[in-house]
Image (spheres, grey):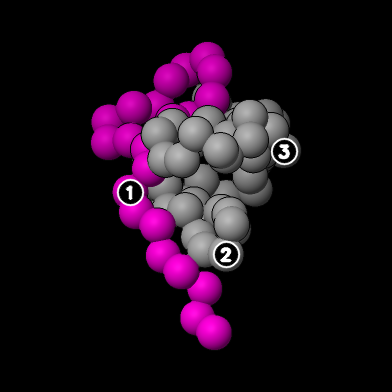
Amino acid sequence: MDNSAGSATGTFDIILEGGPESLPTDVRRQRVDNLADTVKVSHYGGYEHFGRADGESPADGPVPFRWIRRTRIAE
């Protein structure tokens, strides 16, 4: 896997695009240890799901993830 969007320690900067406008900016920009295909964020009693943008792995800058769907937390 190309580590160009991350640091030498194997962490990656990602950016979450789309989804609810109420999702804070500091949540939209994250540093992750593993570059998975999906990211799940807890938000207002549910989860916002983001998927890695196909074919996009910028050499410089955060890896984009786009909003897929929202699920509710089971009660």
Can residue 2 be seen here? The reply is no
Indicate the quadrant where residue 32 lies. Answer: top right
As drawn, is 13 to the left or to the right of 57?
right
Pick the front one: 66 or 43: 43
- In the rendered image, residue 58, in percent from the top left (x then y), is placed at 43, 20
The reply to whether discs 3 and 2 touch (Cβ–Cβ < 8 Å) is no
Q: Amino acid at mark 1?
A: Ile
As drawn, is 70 to the left or to the right of 54?
right
- In the rendered image, residue 66, in percent from the top left (x then y), is placed at 37, 38
Queried whether the magenta region covers residue 4, the answer comes back as no
Pick the front one: 26 or 54: 26
Span colored in magenta = 53-75
Q: Which residue is disc 2 drawn over? A: 45
- In the rendered image, residue 29, in percent from the top left (x then y), is placed at 62, 32
11 above or below 71? above
20 above or below 63? below
Q: Which residue is disc 3 drawn over? A: 9
Neighbour tally class for label 3: few under 14, some 14-19, many 20 plus, Cα within 10 Å:
few
Sequence-wise, which precedes: disc 3 or disc 2?
3
Tell me the residue at 50%/60% (across/down). 47
Indicate the quadrant where residue 75 lies. Answer: bottom right
Locate the N terminus by quadrant: top left
